[in-house]
Image (spheres, helix red, strand yellow):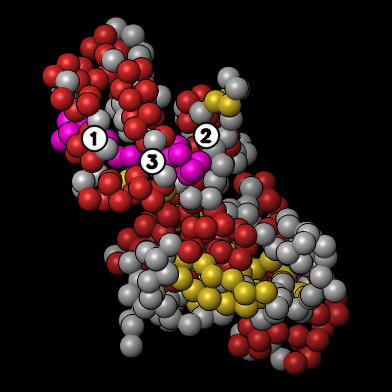
């Protein structure tokens, strides 16, 4: 039987959107019991697609329990504090103002549970902007990523919210470190992860690179990215309209590519080194485009594989999970939700897929958790009647479509 390192640990999540839910998703995959505490309206991601949950909710909230609590009520806050007293970890990404207003700061929660690890993923860590708001795009804009990613000349955000996910991952790293060596002082069990600081760390290579160029060249020269720095490294279209991404970083890679595709440029001594190819970038790019454009995808793939060239097809999202590599045992988790079937990727490094809960309905586990905290049946009934907590609600109804695009049913 697979041993999960966080089995027996209880994690309370007060999360919305991505950063905190992504962190608790990882903790859940490592065996922790995650109780997702949601307001009566639910996590925002429960109502983003056709009136129901989005891919974010489905991918990062399976395996959790949902408890619906109105924290802005006295009875709701009391119930939450009793829950926090039973936990090992609380993690949230609420705004600083909401955290103070709801009375769920580190001081508030460690007053009822001094051993608690308290993690707040927020816009900014300590500094003059400590209480300012930030989101994933704000982190991209303020740390150089957005300036480097332009669409028609306009700085634009990346597609996925990578900074949210990095922040959640950094939170897990800090939490695991504290679990390994728990400090005696409760204040040392407080973690703040800023999206801005996450962005700085992720941009470290580029920030160091521009400093290097400034000192060597006297100007902030920079290259747009690895694929532009190395001619032949990037995406190229085949004759049947499919795209192949080539990994051509070194001179050895270039030799393998030209041999595999029988390119005459491979015999040109003026293109033998990367420095030389950079000086003739347009010629190299045109040659690779032409060579790839003469072959179908299957023809190109066979030649590249036989020649030992690193490559992959650029896949649309709907085809990603069809790849044989993705379908290997232990890589995907299957679950049903609202009568629909889903497969989501497992946490990398897991040896086996351990069966777990599907994504929870809002408030699905409220009464179950309250009873485990020694609330009586009368107490539970009173809390439900006053609206301090809420039970499972099926407030949305997806309208799946038939293959012809018409709604089912």
Q: Is residue 340 left or right of residue 259?
A: right
Magenta residue check for 216 = no
The image shows residue 280 at horizontal and vertical percentages of 28, 15
User: Of the residues tagged 2 and 1, which is closer to the observer?
Assistant: 1
Q: Please report whichever mark, 1 or 3, sits nearer to the chain's N-terminal start.
A: 1
How many marks the image carries: the answer is 3
* Residue 337 location, quadrant: bottom right
Can you tell which mark lies on residue 140? 2
The image shows residue 183 at horizontal and vertical percentages of 33, 62
Q: Quadrant of the C terminus?
A: bottom right
* Residue 157 location, quadrant: top right
Q: Is residue 103 above or below residue 76?
A: above
Magenta residue check for 236 = yes
Tell me which residue sits at (48%, 31%) in the image: 145
Element type where label 3 sits in the image = loop
* Residue 225 location, quadrant: top left
Give the class, few, some or many, for how many residues have Cα within 10 Å of label 2's Cα (few <14, many ≥20). Answer: many
Q: Quadrant of the N terminus?
A: bottom left
- Which of the pair 221/25 is nearer the observer? 221
Q: Please report whichever mark, 2 or 1, sits nearer to the chain's N-terminal start.
A: 2
Element type where label 1 sits in the image = loop
The image shows residue 260 at horizontal and vertical percentages of 23, 41
Residue linked to disc 3: 295
């Amino acid at each position: 039987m697979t041993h999960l390192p966080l089995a027996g640990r209880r994690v309370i999540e007060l999360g919305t959107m991505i950063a905190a839910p992504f962190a608790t998703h990882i903790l859940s995959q490592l065996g922790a019991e995650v109780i997702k505490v949601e307001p009566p309206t639910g996590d925002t991601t429960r109502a983003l697609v056709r009136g129901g949950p989005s891919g974010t909710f489905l991918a990062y909230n399976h395996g959790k329990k949902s408890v619906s609590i109105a924290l802005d009520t006295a009875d709701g806050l009391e119930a939450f504090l009793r829950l926090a007293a039973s936990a090992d970890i609380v993690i949230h990404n609420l705004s600083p103002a909401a955290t103070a207003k709801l009375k769920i700061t580190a001081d508030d929660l460690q007053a009822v549970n001094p051993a608690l690890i308290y993690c707040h993923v927020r816009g900014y860590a300590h500094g003059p902007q400590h209480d300012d708001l930030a989101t994933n795009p704000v982190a991209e804009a303020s740390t150089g990523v957005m300036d480097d990613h332009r669409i028609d000349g306009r700085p634009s955000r990346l597609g996925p919210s990578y900074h949210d996910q990095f922040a959640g991952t950094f939170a897990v790293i800090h939490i695991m470190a504290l679990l390994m060596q728990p400090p005696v002082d409760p204040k040392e069990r407080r973690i703040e992860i800023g999206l801005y600081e996450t962005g700085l760390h992720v941009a470290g290579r580029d920030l160091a690179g521009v400093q290097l160029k400034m000192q060597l060249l006297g100007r902030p020269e920079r290259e747009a990215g690895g694929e532009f720095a190395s001619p032949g490294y990037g995406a190229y279209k085949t004759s049947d309209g499919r795209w192949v991404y080539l990994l051509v970083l070194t001179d050895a890679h270039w030799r393998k590519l030209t041999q595999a595709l029988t390119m005459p440029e491979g015999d040109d001594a003026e293109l033998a080194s990367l420095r030389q190819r950079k000086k003739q970038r347009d010629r190299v790019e045109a040659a690779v485009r032409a060579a790839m454009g003469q072959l179908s995808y299957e023809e190109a793939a066979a030649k590249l594989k036989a020649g030992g060239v690193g490559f992959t097809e650029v896949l649309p999202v709907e085809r990603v999970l069809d790849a044989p590599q993705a379908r290997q045992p232990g890589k995907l988790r299957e679950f049903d939700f609202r009568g629909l079937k889903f497969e989501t990727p497992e946490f990398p490094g897991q040896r086996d897929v351990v069966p777990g809960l599907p994504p929870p309905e809002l408030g699905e586990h409220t009464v179950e958790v309250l009873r485990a905290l020694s609330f009586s049946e009368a107490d539970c009934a009173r809390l439900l009647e006053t609206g301090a907590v809420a039970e499972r609600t099926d407030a949305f109804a997806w309208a799946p479509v038939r293959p012809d695009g018409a709604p089912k049913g």
